[in-house]
Image: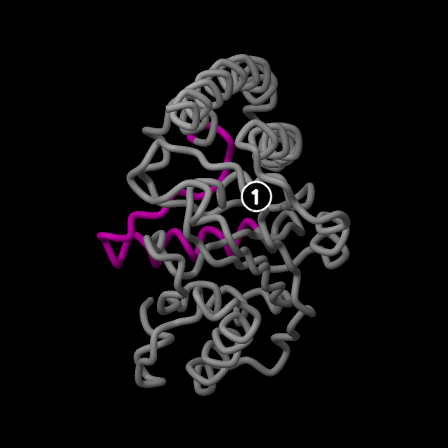
Amino acid sequence: MLARLSSVLRLTVGAIYMAFAVAIFAVLVLVFLPSRSLRIRTCNVFGHVTGRVCLWLSGASVPDGIAEQVRATHPAIYISNHTSMLDIFVGIWLAPIGTVGVAKKQVVYYPFFGQLYAISGHILLDRSNHASAVDALKETAEIIRKYGIGVWMWPEGTRAKDGRLRPFKKGFAHLAIATRLPIVPVVVTGAHKAMQKNSLTIRPTTLGLRALPAISTDDWTLENLDEKVAQVYAAFDQALPDEQKALPLPPADRATGS
């Protein structure tokens, strides 16, 4: 009973905080409406502040120095595994200033956060429409080249209820070929225990956050794309604890998608 009340209190305070934070930053974003680059960077600042505050409100503890580890390589393509709503706050907190986000279009329906995202200049992806998704990735590559920024993505595409690594879609690899940015894998552990999919119950937990060494993409081609994606996938799988490792699947099924 106490745990439930604590969860409700955390969510309520978080919602109130988010409403005020979004109201302030939305004004700034609207002022910078003519400049997509400034809107993206303004929302990066919003993410640094709000992401860390929301993680604190959730009761999640994080390792020292992780932000510096991630931001040591920039610009880059930052990719992370996805098992919980908390992963969103991890991403917006850790993403360096000058990093565009790529999220499913349904994010605009998230209270407060989604509305700011809609005007932020970040990318909305319609995963149900392949042609639209391809166009969105082309737009992302153009923005990266134009503004000299990085990108944060969750290549699994959707959250895993059990915390286990899911097959990767290949959008991040196509971006790597188009931009030649290095890949920075950001491994998150324990988030699925804090807030499970389709649940509003928050359980204080210790998050494991680790930035793996940056991976050069200078030699990535369409011909070796499957091999390169599989190597990145294997690096994630090796870094995860046994309870979050991928279930045994044929190699061809582990890194599929668009």
Mark 1 surroundings within 10 Å by alpha-carbon count, few (fewer than 14), some (14 through 19), many (20 or more):
many
Q: Residue 58 or 48: which is nearer the viewer? A: 58
- 233 and 39: which is toward the camera: 233
Q: Position of residue 219 (x, y in %)?
A: 60, 83
Tell me, yes or no, if residue 43 can be seen here. Answer: no
Q: Which residue is mark 1?
A: 90
Residue 41 appears left or right of 122: right
Q: Which residue is farthest front? A: 1
* Residue 138, magenta (yes or no): yes
Kindly identify the residue that appears in the image at 49 percent across and 40 percent down: 122
Q: Position of residue 41 (x, y in %)?
A: 64, 35
150 is higher (above) or lower (below) than 214: above
Instruction: Identify the residue shown where x is 41% and y is 29%.
Output: 114
Residue 197 or residue 27, whichever sits in front: 197
Residue 48 seen in the current view:
yes
Q: Is residue 148 magenta?
A: no
Instruction: Give the residues drawn in magenta, as a range.
Output: 118-143
- Left or right: where does residue 217 sit relative to residue 80? right
| Image vertical order of residue 27 relative to residue 41, above or below | above
Quadrant assignment for the C terminus: bottom left
Q: Quadrant of residue 60?
A: top right
Residue 61, by quadrant, is top right
In the rendered image of this protein, does residue 66 appear above or below residue 167? above
Q: Nearer the viewer, residue 185 or 122?
A: 185
Residue 37: image quadrant is: top right
Q: Secondary structure at mark 1?
A: helix
| Residue 121, image x, y percentages | 50, 35
At label 1, which amino acid type do we have? Val
Q: Residue at x 43, y 61 (%)?
A: 155
